[in-house]
Amino acid sequence: MGLHELMERGGHRRLIAVVDRDSGLRAWIALHHLDRGPAIGGIRIWTYRNEAEAVADALRLARAMTYKCVLAGVQGGGGKTVVHADALRDRAAAMRRLGEEIEALGGVYHAGPDVGFGPADAFEVERATRHLACFGGGHSGLRPAGEATAEGALWGIRAGLESLGVTDLAGITVAVQGLGAVGCALARRLLEAGARVVAADPDPAAAAAGERLGVELVEPEALPDVPCEVWAPCALGGSLHDLTISRLRTRVVAALANNALSRDDQAVQLARRGILYLPDFVLNAGALIEGEGHARTGRTDWSRELRRIGDTTRRVLERAARDGVPPLAAARTMAEEVLAAEAASRSPVS
Ligand code: NAI
């Protein structure tokens, strides 16, 4: 399928190839939606096997950001930048060039951090553009973004469990995949609420941080086999594939990692196995709500608004039950309906 067809199918507006030979910058900026404020979305620096994989990642992540904004009540659309990590020769110069490109877009795209994009990269990008949103940490006065993400997601997890008749986190077992910023923040909250947390991370430093919190560690390959009430992907996208799904012994999959499913039809597989799937773009909007709200108003405490993620999750589950579809499909439909209503209200009356 050609690029235009791919974009048409996903409803994307713009896809920009960015190249700088001297620094080795090879990036794609995907802008999914531009009619409800700036397209918002992080910069991912990652190793891609080929161009098609990078483009597909950018388009898929940008579209999910639109849904995330809509369902979180954030006035913006979805965007994403992906950078080929292996092509980078002079990383600092490449980030400045990328910043210039973002600046040249004139504010229709507000970039932010994502996987592989660290504070040193942000420093360079910020030298060239005003349009790098800070989603927490650093000099922002906000707590690190992973904290807001975990706090918001936990409201969604509570709502998911409630729909199964589980009203207390005390005594339940949660499997957490990945003990980075989000995974550790989630594990800490779960432990404080009296849950048992079994977790895995291949990075020894991350695993040790989890152990200090009180999680029980298992090897990453063993995590899908852990009997639990909730299985929470907090590592990289695509960790749930056909093989892992067939092994899961959980009642709920709570996706905090973006694009946790490697393919959308796996939401149906999970439903057939009787596992409730809580979609990533519903659960992990906490840092977006807090970061965007802070950028707009300067306010730092967004805990009240993060509770809305629980309400949204409940509405998604009610809609899924009503339509007889998995929650992923219901969440998409709900977001598309909002977008369609907005588009209709913008159309000139004939
Ligand atoms: P991070 O880089 O701090 O942590 C990811 C952790 O996953 C690392 O410690 C890594 O070693 C571990 N990991 C990698 N492969 C693994 C495997 N096979 N099994 C177990 N652990 C594995 O990243 P962060 O910020 O915690 O983000 C995690 C996910 O959440 C990402 O998918 C990100 O896109 C998503 N997300 C993060 C937000 C944030 O506020 N940081 C906001 C929304 C989404």
Image: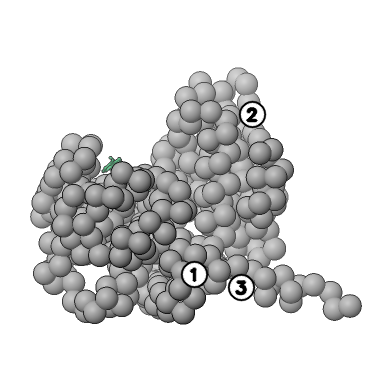
Within 10 Å of disc 2 (Cα), the crowding (few <14, some 14-19, many 20+) is: some
Is the residue 272 above or below the residue 138 in the image? Answer: below
Q: Is residue 148 visible?
A: no
Circles 2 and 1: CB atoms closer than 8 Å: no
Instruction: Give the mark, 2 or 3, whose residue is nearer the N terminus.
Output: 2
The three-letter amino acid code for the residue at tag 1 is: Ala
Label 1 and label 3: CA atoms lie apart by: 13 Å
Q: Quadrant of the N terminus?
A: top right
**Residue 146: x %, y % from top left:** 34, 55
Residue at left 74%, top 74%?
344
Residue located beneath label 3 in the image: 338
Residue drawn where x is 56% and y is 41% of the image: 56
> Which image quadrant for residue 11?
bottom right
Q: Is residue 84 visible?
A: yes
Q: What residue type is disc 2 on?
A: Val
Task: Mark 2 or mark 1: name the one nearer the start of the chain.
Answer: 2
Name the image quarter holding residue 256: bottom left
Q: Which residue is label 2 attached to?
A: 19
Separation of marks 2 and 3 at Cα, in angstroms: 36 Å
46 left or right of 129 in image: left
Q: Amino acid at mark 3?
A: Val
Asked if the residue at label 2 sits under 8 Å from ligand 1, the reply is no
The residues tagged by marks 2 and 1 sit, at their Cα atoms, a distance apart of 38 Å
Between disc 2 and disc 1, the foreground one is: 1
- In the rendered image, which residue does mark 1 sit on? 330
Residue 162 located left or right of residue 121: left
Observer-nearest of 8 and 312? 8
**Residue 106 vs residue 301: left or right?**
right
Task: Give residue 175's position: percent from left, percent from top.
Answer: 21, 55
Residue 140 image point, x, y percent: 43, 56
Q: Secondary structure at mark 2?
A: strand
